[in-house]
Image (cartoon, helix red, strand yellow):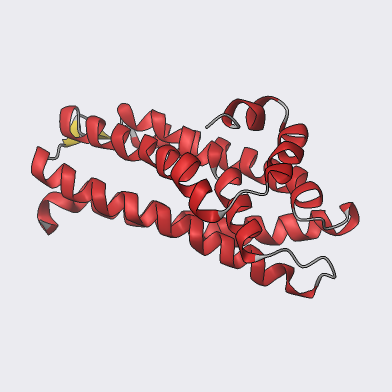
Amino acid sequence: MNHVWGLLAHPGQEMRDIKQENESVSHHYTHHVLLMAAIPVICAFIGTTQLGWNLGEGQFVQLNLLTGIGLGILFYLIILGGVAVMGRVIHWMARNYPQRPSLQRCTVFAGYVATPLFLSGLVALYPLVWLCVLVGAMALVYTGYLLYVGIPVFLSIDRDESLRFSGSTLAIGVLVFEVLLALTVVLWGYGPRLF
């Protein structure tokens, strides 16, 4: 958790500090990912059970507490799985580079790069669809910037290759993000009908 502010304020230096720690995946998950992934889940739970999704024109979809808890657990597991999938994607994409980083390093990198997306979940306290999409898009742009800054530092891929690598990773990440966003909308919006 102590890297959150550094990733937002001075990401290049923070990526160097993170790399020096040589963190294990289990340590990274218990000290960063599990806590940060709880932010959008808790905020979405509060927002959807207390206010409901504001679909515009006075339409709200509000969840009861039991449905919110069930969907919150499912949403949390999807987020944790998304980080692991992106770690594997980064590792797979780096397979042809001479400095091929380990799967552990790629997974840790994916977890830290997802920090802006985790923080954007705060907006789910007031679940207005257009506001959530806007904040999510801004978080995705900053995630792309963290990829660009972090790939040469954290994964030891030279700067010339990092733009192409970060662009490809971001494109795949956008697809994963869209799938998670679609699942989220389905789960949080239509959850009462599913459970």
Outermost residue toward the bottom?
A: 96
Q: Is residue 64 visible?
A: no
Q: Is residue 4 left or right of residue 64?
A: right
Closest to the observer, 11 or 133: 11
Across and down, in percent, residue 149 comes to 76, 43
Q: Is residue 157 left or right of residue 121?
A: right
Q: Residue at x 65, y 67 (%)?
A: 91
For residue 167, above or below residue 6? below
For residue 120, above or below residue 95? above
Across and down, in percent, residue 106 comes to 64, 59
Q: Residue at x 61, y 60 (%)?
A: 104
Image quarter in which the C terminus is found:
bottom left
Q: Residue at x 79, y 59 (%)?
A: 164
Q: Is residue 160 visible?
A: yes
Closest to the observer, 102 or 47: 102
Q: Residue at x 79, y 75 (%)?
A: 96
Across and down, in percent, residue 180 comes to 41, 55
Q: How many marks?
A: 0
Closest to the observer, 168 or 82: 82
**Within the image, what quadrant is residue 174 found in?**
bottom right
Across and down, in percent, residue 181 comes to 40, 51
Q: Is residue 49 left or right of residue 31?
A: left
Closest to the observer, 61 or 149: 149
